[in-house]
Amino acid sequence: KKYTINYNINLPEENSNESVTVPNDMIVLANTEVKLRLPSNTDLNEHKFKGWSLTKDGDVIERCIATSDIALYAIWYKCINVTYELNLPNDFEGSIPTVPIDNNKYILGDKVTPLLLNNYDESNKEYNYKFCGWSLTETGEIIENAAIENEHVQSNSLCLYAVWKKYRYVTYNANFPTEEYPLNRTGEVPIDTNRYVEGDIVTILQNSENNPLGGEEDKDKFCGWTSDIEK
């Protein structure tokens, strides 16, 4: 026995005037698995083809087996725009970078990989903040990627916000013990030229080899560094 597979374009109302052609009807043998075909155009102005369903607003199916005549309806998902905000701190210093422009079309369930910030050079010393990535909110955590969810479909957009962390500097203080009588304090502290942001691990610099702290004329021995000075 043979059955007919019929495709219905099922266009969204706002795209009803667009030219999209459905595949021709298929005649298949009973109990045969049907390989679903694509319409002539899968990208409309505001919608994207997701797949075929057995009902006008049902779940998308990947395959079907002919046990009777089958009508398949095209399912179209609304396209979502992904935009970027610089989200600069009020005391930001340096030339202003520019946000990327994403021309891709996303639909519900798609994964978004954030784009790179434009005109930004991390090694530029004029910056007092470091660009660390993108977040879903102005003060949120950094994300590696984002997923298009129902809330983005309802608002018709997903906005990603730049995350900035202020540069910090590590300095060293000889912290010589106070004495009631003068001593010849010798040595120089190391100089760290690196810039750090919150969360970075700081590798403590060693005592100077050329002019170390605690020379022969010092009665106190240099033992190392602490971040909390104890007298």
Image (cartoon, grey):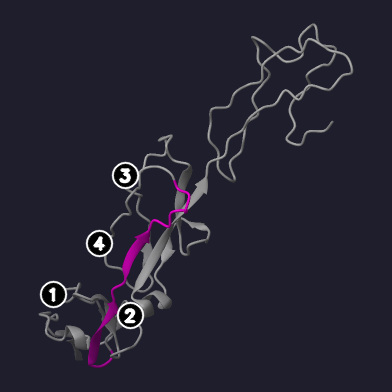
Residue indicated by mark 1: 40
Instruction: Give the quarter of the figure containing the C terminus.
Output: top right
Residue indicated by mark 2: 61
Of label 3 and label 1, which has the lower sequence position?
1
Assess whether mark 1 and mark 2 are in contact (beta carbons under 8 angstroms): no
Q: Which mark is residue 70?
A: none
Residue 60 rendering spot, x and y as whole percentages: 33, 81
Residue indicated by mark 3: 119
Q: CA distance from mark 2 to mark 1?
A: 19 Å
Residue 16 rendering spot, x and y as whole percentages: 15, 86
Q: Residues within 10 Å of mark 3 (few under 14, many from 20)?
A: few
Write down the region rendered in magenta.
Answer: 67-92
The answer to which of 49 and 126 lies nearer the viewer is: 126
Residue indicated by mark 4: 103
Judge depth for marks 3 and 1 and give the one in front: 3
Looking at the rendered structure, the kind of residue marked 1 is Ser
The answer to which of 209 and 8 lies nearer the viewer is: 209
Left or right: residue 181 compared with residue 156: right
Q: CA distance from mark 4 to mark 3?
A: 19 Å
Q: CA distance from mark 2 to mark 3?
A: 44 Å
Of label 2 and label 4, which has the lower sequence position?
2
**Residue at 52% from the left image edge and 48% from the top image edge:** 165
**Residue at 82% from the left image edge and 11% from the top image edge:** 183
Q: Is residue 131 above or below residue 112?
A: above
Looking at the rendered structure, the kind of residue marked 3 is Asn
**Is residue 200 part of the magenta span, yes or no?**
no
Q: Residues within 10 Å of mark 2 (few under 14, many from 20)?
A: few
Left or right: residue 161 compared with residue 56: right
Residue at the outermost right position: 180
Q: CA distance from mark 3 to mark 1?
A: 40 Å
**Residue at 42% from the left image edge and 37% from the top image edge:** 126
